[in-house]
Amino acid sequence: MPDFAAPEFWVAVFQIIAIDILLGGDNAVVIALACRKLPEKQRNSGIFWGVFGAIGLRVLLIYFALQLLAIPYLKIVGGLLLFWIGVKLILPGDDAHGDVQSSTSLAGAIKTIIVADAVMSIDNVIAVAGAAHGSIILVVFGIVVSIPIVVWGSKLVLTLMDRYPMIITAGGGLLGWIGGGMLIGDPAIPEAWRGALPHGAHVCGAVGAMAVVIVGKLLTKRH
């Protein structure tokens, strides 16, 4: 059972919420596209059940990801993937919603939302699993808190990202921080190595954050 009074718990919750906003901020766009052909009376039902199913599937995927991260070397792989995801977040991207199909039936819209969310959330699953430090309760708590922010606040968040690019850069740095912590926390890393580096997770996190931001900025200039 997590300690709700511990600062570490709330830091991890903040990280999960930030990840959901940064990597899942376009979910509201997907939901709108999937439900736009539904009759007015069915749209709220489509949104509710689509989000409910998508969140349930995401929690299930993160649960399995948490189990896999206990296997040696997989945290190293996950950390490196987070570095790449962080760099991609900083790079200017294309609109990825053009292929989201709308449906005239409630069941079809719900299916579209769930499938699209599952495909788009692989990076989110890896990042949240890294931030949760093995706690499925922390995962559920963080996602539940972030649902209203993601669904109803996505347009505001996306507008702020367009206006203040530093938010995107900071988000990429956050993913690099979590990735660096995952690298040093892998079971394959000898305990002596971790003990030889004071505050190893924080040091590796800081190095990872700086690496993601620097590489992202350099690649952006090349583009």
Image (cartoon, rainbow, N blue to C red):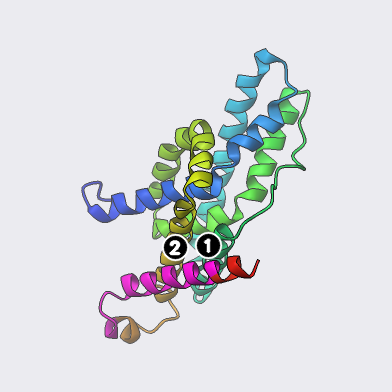
Q: Badge 1 local density, few (<14 within 10 Å), some, or many (20+)?
A: many
Occupied quadrant, residue 45: top right
Q: Is residue 69 magenta?
A: no
Characterize the magenta stretch by its predominant secondary structure.
helix
Real-space CA distance between mark 2 and mark 1, rounded to the nearest whole angstrom: 7 Å
Counting every numbered tag in the picture gives 2
The answer to whether any part of residue 126 appears in the image is: yes
- Residue named by callout 1: 86
Q: Residue at x 38, y 69 (%)?
A: 205
The answer to whether any part of residue 136 appears in the image is: no
What kind of element bears circle 2?
helix
Q: Residue at x 70, y 47 (%)?
A: 96
Q: Residue at x 70, y 32 (%)?
A: 33
The residue range painted magenta reads 195-217
Q: Position of residue 160 (x, y in %)?
A: 48, 42
Q: Nearer the viewer, residue 184 or 94?
A: 94
| Side of 62 relative to 7 (left or right) | right
Q: Amino acid at mark 2?
A: Gly
Q: Nearer the viewer, residue 125 or 149?
A: 149
Q: Position of residue 67 (x, y in %)?
A: 50, 61
Q: Badge 2 local density, few (<14 within 10 Å), some, or many (20+)?
A: many
Which of the two labelled residues, at mark 2 and mark 1, occupies the earlier sequence position?
1
What kind of element bears circle 1?
helix
- Residue named by callout 2: 173
Q: Position of residue 223 (x, y in %)?
A: 65, 66
Q: Residue at x 77, y 36 (%)?
A: 101
Mark 1 and mark 2 in contact (Cβ < 8 Å)?
Answer: yes
Q: Position of residue 10 (x, y in %)?
A: 29, 49
| Residue 192 against residue 201 in the figure, above or below | below
Occupied quadrant, residue 27: top right
